[in-house]
Image (tube, grey):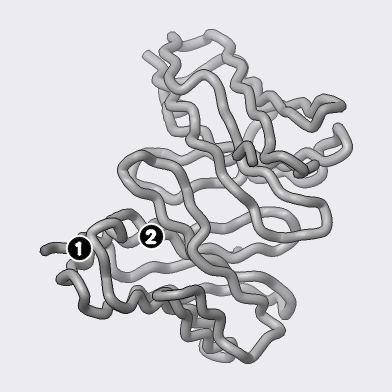
Amino acid sequence: AQTVTQSQPEMSVQEAETVTLSCTYDTSESNYYLFWYKQPPSRQMILVIRQEAYKQQNATENRFSVNFQKAAKSFSLKISDSQLGDTAMYFCAFMIGYALNFGKGTSLLVTP
Amino acid sequence: DAGVTQSPTHLIKTRGQQVTLRCSPKSGHDTVSWYQQALGQGPQFIFQYYEEEERQRGNFPDRFSGHQFPNYSSELNVNALLLGDSALYLCASSLRTQETQYFGPGTRLLVL
């Protein structure tokens, strides 16, 4: 079975600070893609960042970056200079074939 | 650039009834995937349609069926509704040649 584990159900960070969300996954495949999505209270799932498993370089998108450790099957998300608008549920997911496999999510609250 | 749209936004049905949910993909996309998101959980993959055919299916019973039209829009049908079918149903679109899926705002289904 392919699983995704997000061990932090809830996290809180102050505005302008940095926070890291953890994600581990389990698969026997060698070629796959990894994603972080955010889901604000409006419930629209928004792509944050993606990583190809065959690439060693960690992906970066503005204030968002990942730490991808393939051997450890770890894929954490770092949010720098947190903003109030970053408050949302964050889901880690990986894709094998055509299906996204999601974790249960981490609820992130950014406080003033 | 039109994003993924879904209709209706909310729906209330009773057990045993049938429901049809609709999705229009992002402009230029040709592939549609459907996910079920129960309260407090990550989305679960139902199936994906490409070229009007079901290309991959998740672990859902045959009560869940779908269709894709020549204009790439899609429908999700659920027969013999159960209380446990109450969830947010998310549609995502993508290009056949690319892995990234973009989500719509979802349809909230409540089965009484």
Classify residue A58 by image quadrant: bottom right
Image location of residue B2, percent across then percent down: 63, 37
Question: Residue pushed farthest front?
Answer: B1
The reply to the same-chain question for discs 1 and 2 is yes
Near-viewer residue (A111 or A76): A111
- Helix, strand or loop status at disc 2: strand
Asked if A80 appears above or below B11 in the picture, the reply is below
Image location of residue A77, percent across then percent down: 41, 75
Near-viewer residue (B37 or B84): B37
Parent chain of label 1 = A
Residue type at tag 1: Val
Q: Is residue A13 left or right of residue A50?
A: left
- Can you see residue A3? no
Asked if A14 appears above or below A86 in the picture, the reply is below
User: Which residue is labeled 1 in the image?
Assistant: A110
Near-viewer residue (A110 or A89): A110
Image location of residue A90, percent across then percent down: 38, 60
For the residues marked 1 and 2, what is the alpha-carbon distance in whole angstroms?
13 Å
Image location of residue B37, percent across then percent down: 46, 41
Q: Which mark is residue A90?
A: 2
Q: Earlier in the sequence, mark 1 or mark 2?
A: 2
Parent chain of label 2 = A
Classify residue B31 by image quadrant: top right
What's the residue at 58%, 91% (across, down)?
A: A71
Q: Which mark is residue B57?
A: none
What's the residue at 70%, 64% (across, down)?
A: A96
Question: Residue pushed farthest left?
Answer: A112
Q: Is residue B22 left or right of residue A77?
A: right
